């Protein structure tokens, strides 16, 4: 055997080692981003549930207050008005939630950017 092939094998091994190290770093970044996204979503979910619960309790109290205040004169009209206001509020919230969902940034944005940088570096001669 000649020794000419050994430097080539070493270069290929170093290149593969660098590629695997780069890939490993990117996988770690994906894991970190996934953990951060999970914590963020869980926090949003808990705060959203608490807000909904408290909001429903406030709406029940408001409905009872208005119904009692107008019980002798305009009870049906007052309840109909409250129902319309609640329905419009629900519609606005639903539309905002849908808009927020559609305009959300990609989940693994930083990882995708790093992969793009890696691809550009590897394409350079």
Image (spheres, rainbow, N blue to C red):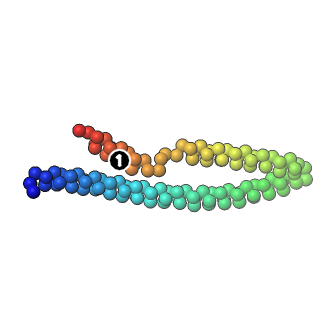
Residue at x 32% of width, y 54% of height: 23
Seen at 43% across and 47% down, the residue is 109
Q: Quadrant of the C terminus?
A: top left
Q: Position of residue 102 (x, y in %)?
A: 56, 44
Residue at the location (57% across, 47% down)?
A: 101
Residue 55 locus on image (x, y percent): 68, 56
Q: Secondary structure at mark 1?
A: helix
Task: Report the residue that reaches farthest toward the top.
Answer: 125
Residue 60 placement: quadrant: bottom right
Residue found at x 75% / y 58%: 61
Q: In the rendered view, does 60 fall on the left or right side of 75? A: left
Residue assigned mark 1 = 114
Check the image and name the residue furthest to the left.
2
Q: Is the N terminus in the top left, top right, bottom left or bottom right quadrant?
A: bottom left
Q: How many marks?
A: 1
Determine crowd level at label 1: few under 14, some 14-19, many 20+ residues with C-alpha closer than 10 A.
Answer: some
Q: Residue furthest right?
A: 72
> Which percent across, then down, holds residue 105?
49, 45
2 or 67, nearer to the observer: 2
Viewer-proximal residue among 103 and 93: 103
43 left or right of 117? right
Q: Where 43 falls versus 107 (above or below)? A: below
| 89 relative position to 50: left or right | right
Q: Between 51 and 11, which is closer to the camera in this rendering?
A: 11
Residue 86 lies, in percent from the top left, at: 74, 49
């Amino acid at each position: 055997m000649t020794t000419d092939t050994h430097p080539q094998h070493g270069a290929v091994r170093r290149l593969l080692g660098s590629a695997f190290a780069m890939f490993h770093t990117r996988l770690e970044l994906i894991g970190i981003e996934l953990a951060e996204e999970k914590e963020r979503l869980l926090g949003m979910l808990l705060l959203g549930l608490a807000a909904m619960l408290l909001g429903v309790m406030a709406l029940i109290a408001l409905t009872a207050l208005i119904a009692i205040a107008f019980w002798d004169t305009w009870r049906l009209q007052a309840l109909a008005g409250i129902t319309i206001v609640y329905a419009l509020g629900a519609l606005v919230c639903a539309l905002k939630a849908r808009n927020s969902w559609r305009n959300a940034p990609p989940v693994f944005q930083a990882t995708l950017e790093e992969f793009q940088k890696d691809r550009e570096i590897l394409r350079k001669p």
